[in-house]
């Protein structure tokens, strides 16, 4: 499964129609969730049937394509199923009880409600009663290589810098890569994004830090123009849009950096070991939270796992406990503070960078625990489950997509 993204160019009234379709999607999703809360034993197919009831009761819901209504119901069921799954697994802390959404930014069509112009593949027509009509697609990808039956989903997504159209295409994008015969372990950090067991380090890009002053300035402009209890002015909306665009740029920079680094890491070795970090717990540290979130360890791990499946490599996540303390040569425990950057063992007299020592311990742990992990195509993530992207593309309610590899519009 791949997702190709194009920017949408349309008229003002067409953008309004897209917004109306997105609001209808949000309405149906929240109504389905309320129906599940009020009726015991409601299942997935019951929510799909309830979409027909909503279409009969509300004229604006009937204007949306029937499969788009079902997609909205599937979003509600996705949140419900995730909650049940967390309860069954006894996940510590909050289980993620489904909540109503007030900021949905996308509408999703399945196999009907749209028609692609097969001559140029640069225009798409949405044929439901929302009157979106024919819009232009701006991008470098060529959809003529894919038949209509391979396009499983079409999404219209509203972002800070405009509207986008995403095509979920059911194709096998695995690549055959020559084996390298190497195995590496990665130690995640803040000074460097990671340090492997050979001593190679990847610099921390610090995208948010580099844009922090500009973000603060734009945020002050938004705050000055905000009028409490009154309709907001056009200047306020413009200032808010500028702030959102800069936040979007930072997130795109971090995402593209994670893809590039993960691709290089997985192609350079046949076995990749990394730390199974609980980022959600680590960001509770008020002194390090901003730096931890800025580097994006979770996204880096996500793309390492993805490219591991794509290139047929083994990726293993191991618990990070004592990887910094243990000596990678003799196993002796050497206590260190965060300011101590050199590992010195009093038993075997080993002296090396503390991050390199930790990376070696990560690799040793992975080699001991990997065992018979199965074929490379069935390599598992840290929890022993197939990652979410390995079973298809899932669209979140905020318009972001958990996709295998986003071939985005080149900006």
Image (cartoon, rainbow, N blue to C red):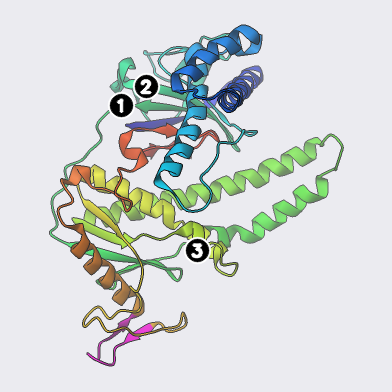
Residue 399 magenta-drawn?
no
Q: Which residue is mark 2?
A: 152
Residue 56 visible in the displayed image:
yes
Q: Is residue 160 left or right of residue 153?
A: right
Residue at image coords 31%, 65%: 186
Residue at image coords 32%, 52%: 304
Tag shown at residue 282: 3
Mark pair 1, 2: CA separation: 7 Å
Looking at the picture, does residue 18 appear above or below residue 326? above
Helix, strand or loop at mark 3: helix
Residues under numbered marks 1 and 2 in contact, where contact means CB atoms less than 8 Å apart: yes
Residue 192 quadrant: bottom left
Residue 198 quadrant: bottom left
Farthest top residue?
56
Residue 140 visible in the displayed image:
no
Mark 3 vs mark 1: in front: 3
Residue at image coords 43%, 12%: 112
Mark found first going from the N terminus, 3 or 1 = 1
Percent of width and height locating residue 126: 51, 13
Q: Crowding at label 1, few (<14), some or many (≥20) Cα neighbours within 10 Å?
A: some
Mark found first going from the N terminus, 2 or 3 = 2
Percent of width and height locating residue 88: 41, 42
Helix, strand or loop at mark 1: loop
Q: Which residues are magenta?
A: 342-353
Q: Which residue is mark 1?
A: 170
Residue 351 magenta-drawn?
yes
């Amino acid at each position: 499964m791949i997702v190709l993204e194009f920017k949408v160019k349309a008229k003002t009234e067409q953008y309004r129609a897209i917004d109306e379709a997105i609001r209808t999607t949000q309405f149906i999703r929240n109504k389905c969730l309320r129906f599940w809360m009020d009726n015991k034993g409601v299942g997935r197919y019951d929510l799909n049937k309830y979409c027909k009831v909503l279409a009969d009761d509300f004229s604006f819901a009937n204007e949306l394509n029937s499969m788009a209504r079902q997609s909205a119901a599937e979003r509600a069921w996705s949140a419900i199923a995730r909650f049940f799954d967390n309860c069954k697994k006894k996940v510590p802390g909050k289980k993620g009880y489904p909540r109503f959404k007030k900021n949905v930014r996308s509408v999703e069509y399945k196999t009907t409600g749209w028609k692609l112009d097969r001559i140029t593949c640069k225009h798409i027509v949405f044929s439901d009663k929302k009157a979106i009509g024919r819009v232009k697609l701006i991008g470098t990808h060529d959809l003529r290589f894919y038949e209509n039956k391979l396009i499983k989903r079409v999404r219209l997504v509203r972002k800070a810098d405009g509207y986008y159209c995403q095509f979920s295409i059911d194709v096998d994008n695995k690549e055959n890569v020559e084996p390298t015969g190497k195995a590496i372990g990665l130690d995640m950090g803040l000074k460097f994004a990671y340090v492997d067991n050979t001593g190679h380090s990847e610099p921390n890009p610090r995208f948010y830090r580099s844009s922090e002053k500009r973000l603060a300035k734009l945020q002050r402009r938004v705050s000055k123009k905000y009028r409490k209890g009154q309709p907001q002015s056009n200047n306020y909306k413009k200032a808010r849009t500028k702030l959102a665009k800069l936040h979007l740029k930072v997130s795109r920079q971090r995402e593209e950096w994670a893809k590039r680094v993960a691709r290089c890491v997985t192609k350079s070795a046949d076995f990749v070991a990394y730390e199974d970090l609980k980022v959600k717990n680590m960001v509770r540290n008020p002194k390090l939270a901003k730096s931890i979130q800025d580097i994006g360890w979770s996204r880096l791990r996500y793309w390492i796992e993805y490219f591991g499946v794509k290139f047929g490599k083994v990726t293993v996540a191991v618990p990070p406990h004592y990887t910094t303390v243990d000596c990678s040569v003799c196993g002796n425990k050497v206590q260190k503070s965060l300011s101590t950057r050199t590992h010195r063992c009093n038993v075997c007299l080993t002296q090396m960078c503390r991050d390199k020592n930790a990376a070696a311990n990560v690799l040793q742990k992975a080699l001991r625990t990997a065992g018979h992990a199965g074929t490379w195509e069935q390599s598992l993530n840290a929890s022993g489950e197939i990652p979410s992207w390995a079973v298809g593309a899932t669209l979140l309610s905020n318009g972001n997509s958990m996709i295998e590899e986003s071939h985005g519009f080149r900006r």
